[in-house]
Image (cartoon, helix red, strand yellow):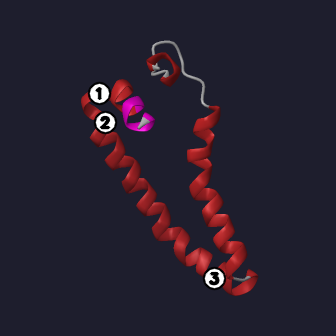
Amino acid sequence: AVLPSLLLKRYGSRTYIIMGTAECIRGIFAFFACPLFGKLSDVWGRRPCLLITVLGTLAPVCSLAFWKPQDGAYDPSSSL
């Protein structure tokens, strides 16, 4: 997988701390966002709110397609 390789190359032994911190922040945001989307779904309906949450989940993953490696960063095309 590309992402773990990128993280290991960039953060080294701190990768698990970085990933744990990111997951903690994501959990805190979810703690506040879930009730908000629950109330919005009562007003707008379930489908628009689900679409927004799915797009928010997919956006970071899809943005990796446009990511350009910096000098010294992992380049997946170089390992082929």
The Cα atoms of the two marked residues, 1 and 2, are separated by 6 Å
* Mark 1, secondary structure of its residue: helix
Q: Is residue 51 left or right of residue 67?
A: right
Residues at marks 3 and 1 touching, judged by CB atoms closer than 8 Å: no
Percent from the top left, x then y, of residue 29? 49, 61
Q: Which residue is mark 1?
A: 12
Residue 39 is tagged as 3
Percent from the top left, x then y, of residue 72? 45, 13
9 over 33 or under it: above or below: above
Highlighted range, magenta? 2-6
**How many labels were placed on the picture?**
3
Q: Which residue is mark 2?
A: 15
16 over 5 or under it: above or below: below
Give the residue type at disc 1.
Answer: Gly
Observer-side mark, 3 or 1, equals 1
Q: Which quadrant, please, contains the N terminus?
A: top left
Q: Is residue 27 left or right of residue 55?
A: left
Give the residue at the far left of this rendering: 13
* Mark 3, secondary structure of its residue: helix
Q: Earlier in the sequence, mark 2 or mark 3?
A: 2
